[in-house]
Amino acid sequence: MVDFIKVMLPVKYQSILEGNSLLNFTENVNTTTGEIISNVKTAYYKNMKFEIYSSGNIFISGSLHKLYNQGEHNYNDFSIDDFLKTVLLLKSQFSIDACDCRLRCLEIGVNVVVPYEVDEVINHSILHRKVSFESKYHNAEGNYKQCVHSQYYIKLYNKTKHFKSRFSDVPDNLMRFEIKYRKMEKLNRIGIYSLNDLKRELFLNFKESLLLEWDNVLFYDFTTQIDHLKERERLKIERYDSLNFWDSLIQGTNENYKYHKGQLKKSIDKYSNNVQSEVSSLIGYKIDELIKETTLNDHLYIESNKVVSLTKKCIITNVNISMQRDASLLLSHSGLRYYFEKDINLYNRIKNEYLSYKWINSPMNVQIREIAHNIRNKASNTRVRNSKYYIPQQYNIVRELGV
DNA sequence: GCAGATTGCTTTGGGACTCC
DNA sequence: GGAGTCCCAAAGCAATCTGC
C-alpha cells in the first residue's frame, strides 16, 4: 500500500551512509577545473535515491514497494507485512531507524484487477473534486492520469500496459489508484510524522482515504445503456462524458454543478453496471487483504495450507484445486470461494475469463455458480468437439491428456 | 438419507458463412 | 436478402459423489 516516500534524516547519518559499501555517492564536477559544482552528493540503490546536501540535509526518496521487489516494479501486492520487512531492510542494510525518517512525502495506493479495460476506466474518470485529470508520462511509470491538488495528487495507472511487456505474470486489467501526499498536514493530523508512525491500525485510515477519494472521482460510466431512450434524453446523458461540459459547469454556480452531478448519478444508477462502485468494492477488498494480520506464524493456517500445497490442478484453468474434494478435475464452487477469500486477484482473473456479461451484477454465489458452470462447459464442449474431429481408432493426444 | 458439491451430457441461441 | 448449415459458447438439467 505504501509506495513512494521522501524522508529527511538527521545529520548523524551522513558518515553512516557515506561509509556504506552499497552506496556509491557521486557529485557534479567541472571537468576543466576539477571544481565541485553541485551542493549535493547522490547515490542510488534499487530505485532509492540517497542525497546528502552540503547544508547537512539528508534525504532518501523512492518507492519502498519497488525496493522490496529489488528495484524492479510495483505491480504486485505490497502488504503491510511487506512494508514492515522493507523498513527492517533499511535498518539492516543502512542502519537507518524508522523513527529517524521524518516523512516529507508519502504515496499510498492499491493495485486492483478490474473486470473492464483499465483504459476505459481511466479515460472516463473526468474530474476529482472539481479538478480535471491530466495525462502524464514518466520514464519509470509510463502513461498515467493525474489530478493535482494543493496538498496531494490523485493518480490512475494502467499497470498491465506498463509492465506486461517486461513481466509475463502481470495480470490483465490491472489498475492502480494512488494518493500522493506532497504536504504532510493531512497525515500529521492523524499522527503520522515518521516512518515509525506507519502502524497497522493507521492503515485503516488509508483505506478510508483511498475509498473516499475514489468516490470523489467524477466518473462517466461507460457501461451506460441508453440507446433505447429518446434522442433528447440520450443527448442529455451523453454530454456528461465531456470534460468541456464539466469545465463550463465548474466556472458557473456550485448549485448547477451539484445538480448535474446528481443527474449523472441518477443515470448511472438507472442505466449502467455502476463501474465506480464495483471498483470501490475491489479496492476495499484488496486493502483488507493487504492490512490483515499475518498468518505466517499461525500453526493452523500453515497446516491447512499444506493440503493446498499438494498441487492438483484444474485441467481447464490450470489453477491449484487441492482444496476441493479428491476426485475433482475442474475448478468448482469451493475452489472459487477459496480464491475469493484468499487470492482476490486470481479470482478476478478467472471471473474475467469465465463469467459472461449477463451475470456481472448478480450476487456473489450466483457468479461463482456460473463461473464453475462455464469452466466445465469449456471442458465438455472441448471434449465434444474433439470427439467429432478424431475417428475412434486415431491416436488423440487431447483424449490422452484427459481434456 | 439428505443436502450440498461436483460433473457430464443435451439443448438452445446466435454469429458466420455459403448458396440460391 | 433470406434460407440452410455449421460451429461455438452458454444454459438447462440430471446423475453421481461426499460428508454429516
Image (tube, coloured by chain):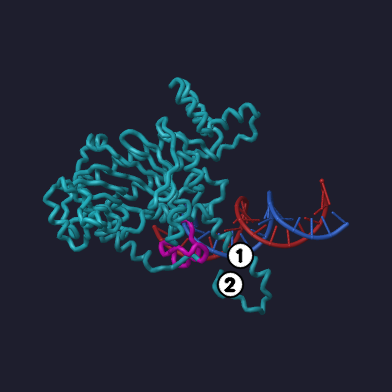
Chain colours: A cyan, B blue, C red
Residue numbers of the magenta segment:
A315-334
- Is residue A323 part of the magenta span, yes or no? yes
Q: At 44% across and 34% down in the image, what residue appears?
A: A132
Q: Mark 2 points at which residue?
A: A398
Q: Can residue A206 be seen in this view?
A: yes
A201 magenta-colored: no
Determine the residue located farthest toward the front in the rendered image.
A32
Q: How far apart are marks 1 and 2 (CA)?
A: 9 Å
Residue at mark 2: chain: A
- Whether tag 1 and tag 2 are in contact, CB under 8 A, the answer is yes
Mark with earlier residue (1, 2): 1
The location of residue A58, given as percent across then percent down, is: 18, 48
Left or right: A78, with A23 as reference point: right
Q: Label 1, on which residue?
A: A382
Dot 1, how many residues are within 10 Å of its Cα: few (below 14), some (14-19), or many (20+)?
few
Tell me what residue is drawn at x 56 percent, y 69 percent.
A403
